[in-house]
Amino acid sequence: MSADLHARAREFVDRNQDLSPAEQAWLEDHLRQCAQCNDYAELTARAIQGLGSFSFSVGPALVARTQEALTRRAREMEAERSRRRMYLLGFVIACLFTAAGSVLGWQGWAWVAQRLQLVPWEWQLGFSLFWVFPSATIAMLLLVGLGLERSRIHERSLV
Ligand SMILES: [Zn+2]
């Protein structure tokens, strides 16, 4: 039997659904005579049946572990969100204290400087070093904390 006939038979097996009655008859005849093509047809039929009934069961332990992992991740994300909110709130409060405290403290500081007979650049420098610089530093540290928290979350989402 020529190789063309086997190839034709296998092609017919592959297109099993849309064969003409003549092709179907020819294929059945060939499969009766040819063990190789018959094996191929049976394997194909079994594979199609196997795909039709393909399913997998998941054990309750795996379901529980998956749910637990999802719940834990949701809790971690909520904690990260509240930490970020805390940093942001801290930053805003530190900025407000810097601005409001500077406005309020300026007069008192000027009064003290006058009593101590300091020249303007001395008391202005002192005010900057002892009031504006510390609270601005705290505000900046909170902003850095917020940035670190963001990059940590970003890194984790890449993993
Ligand atoms: Zn054949």
Image (tube, rainbow, N blue to C red):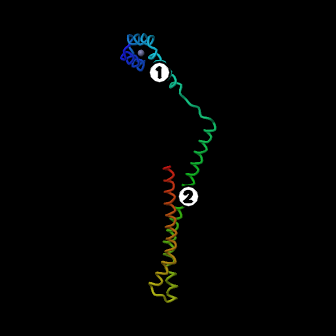
SS under mark 2: helix
Q: CA distance from mark 2 to mark 1?
A: 59 Å
Q: Position of residue 59 (x, y in %)?
A: 62, 35
Report the residue at 52% width, 88% height from top. 116
Q: Are marks 2 and 1 in contact (CB under 8 Å)?
A: no
* Of pointers 2 and 1, the one earlier in the residue sequence: 1
Residue 1, quarter of the rendered image? top left
Kindly identify the residue that appears in the image at 61 percent across and 42 percent down: 65
Above or below 28: residue 123: below
Mark 1: few, some, or many residues within 10 Å (few <14, many ≥20)? some
- Badge 1 is on which residue? 44
24 on left or right of 60: left
Q: Label 1 amino acid?
A: Thr
- Looking at the rendered structure, the secondary structure element under dot 1 is helix
Q: Is residue 70 above or below residue 123?
A: above
Estimate the x, y position of residue 32 in percent, counting from the top left: 45, 11
In the image: residue 9, left or right of residue 59: left
In the image, 46 versus 32, the foreground residue is 32
Mark 2 lies on residue: 83
The kind of residue tagged 2 is Arg
Quadrant field for ligand 1: top left
